[in-house]
Amino acid sequence: MALLKFGRNSDAEKPVNANLEAFLAGYSIEVMPRTAAKIADFRDLLPSGTRVYVAHIEGTPIEDMVATAKRLKGEGFEVMPHFPARIIADKATLADWINRYQGEADVKQALVLAGGVEKPYGDYSDSMQLLDSGLFDKAGFTDLHVAGHPEANKDIDPDGGRSNVNAALGWKQAFSERTDARMALATQFCFESGPVIDWVNDLAEMGIDIPVHIGIAGPAKLQTMIKFALACGVGPSLRVLQRRAKDVSKLLLPFEPTEILSELADHKAANPDFNIAKVHLFPLGGIKTGANWVTNNAGASGIPAAQQ
């Protein structure tokens, strides 16, 4: 049973789940250059030092990515830009991106992933090739995150299994043991706690001890959530949204991640060795909406920098 208390960021009569507060501490959030440009000052929304992933969507100029990283760093946040393998032409381009991020924005963190492009631009098709280049270690990157898939990934395993995903995880585990960088598995979002718990437990049985940063979709309209879930290949937990869509009374209400996060938080509290270390928020309903939801549920650790 979760402990309940009254939180400073909630309404006077709204009980806050103490386990959820602890689970949300140190959460991260994701932005794109075009969405970041709409925010006057992130210090009005995020706790000081929050890790902000900068998503690199195909077609976004590297100049825009670096400028966004520089701006966020200047406002006091930890910045982790995406390095999507399939849009990086060659080793020289990878080296250039690393040098730009470091030289102009003092970036020492990266989310290294294959990317959603079907046909690679050049020499790289997966995150392992980028890691194996040695360039991140040579540049002294302190944190390297890679993708995790609690509900498998049909782009990697078309048959719906996990053989290729698990082989990649084995490689990443071995890499984590030879790099000086801290590693984590940043996952795709899903909507049901059961598959996540089973997947994290399966990782432990496989000998994968890279900490998991669980991806969660921030509050959004149900139609928006379903659109993104289908586009991103969310697996069986999509049924949570499908069930809700059948309830006419809830169609116009925003879908919030309270239930799944509370269940995961309670499981973590009861099982301290459970290997979810952090929460990563995909702000599908907007950055302000997502950040405000965390502020109202994370207690003191969720207070925006401007209010501290």
Image (cartoon, rainbow, N blue to C red):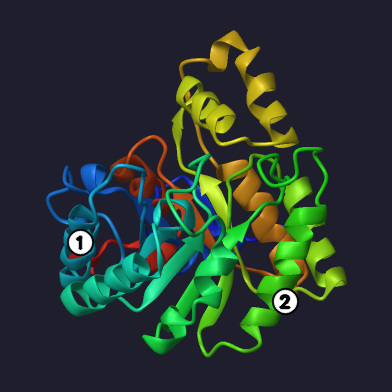
Q: Is residue 165 above or below residue 153?
A: below
Q: Is residue 87 above or below residue 35?
A: below
Residue at the top extreme of this rendering: 248
- Residue 203 as seen in the image, left or right of residue 294: right
Residue at figure coordinates x 29%, y 67% from the top left: 97
Q: Is residue 112 visible?
A: yes
Distance of label 1 from label 2 (alpha carbons): 33 Å
The 10 Å Cα crowd at callout 2, few under 14, some 14 to 19, many 20 or more, is some
x, y (%) of residue 280?
A: 49, 57
The image quarter in which residue 148 lies: bottom right
x, y (%) of residue 202?
A: 84, 62
x, y (%) of residue 23?
A: 57, 64
What element does badge 2 sit on?
Answer: loop
The three-letter code of the residue at mark 2 reads: Asp
Residue at figure coordinates x 29%, y 60% from the top left: 46
Q: Dot 1 corresponds to which residue? A: 43
Q: Nearer the viewer, residue 304 or 174?
A: 174
- Residue 209, numbered circle: 2
Q: Is residue 4 visible?
A: no
The three-letter code of the residue at mark 1 reads: Arg
Residue at figure coordinates x 67%, y 30% from the top left: 238
What element does badge 1 sit on?
Answer: helix
- Residue 89 as seen in the image, left or right of residue 189: left
x, y (%) of residue 181?
A: 50, 84
Q: Quadrant of the N terminus?
A: bottom right
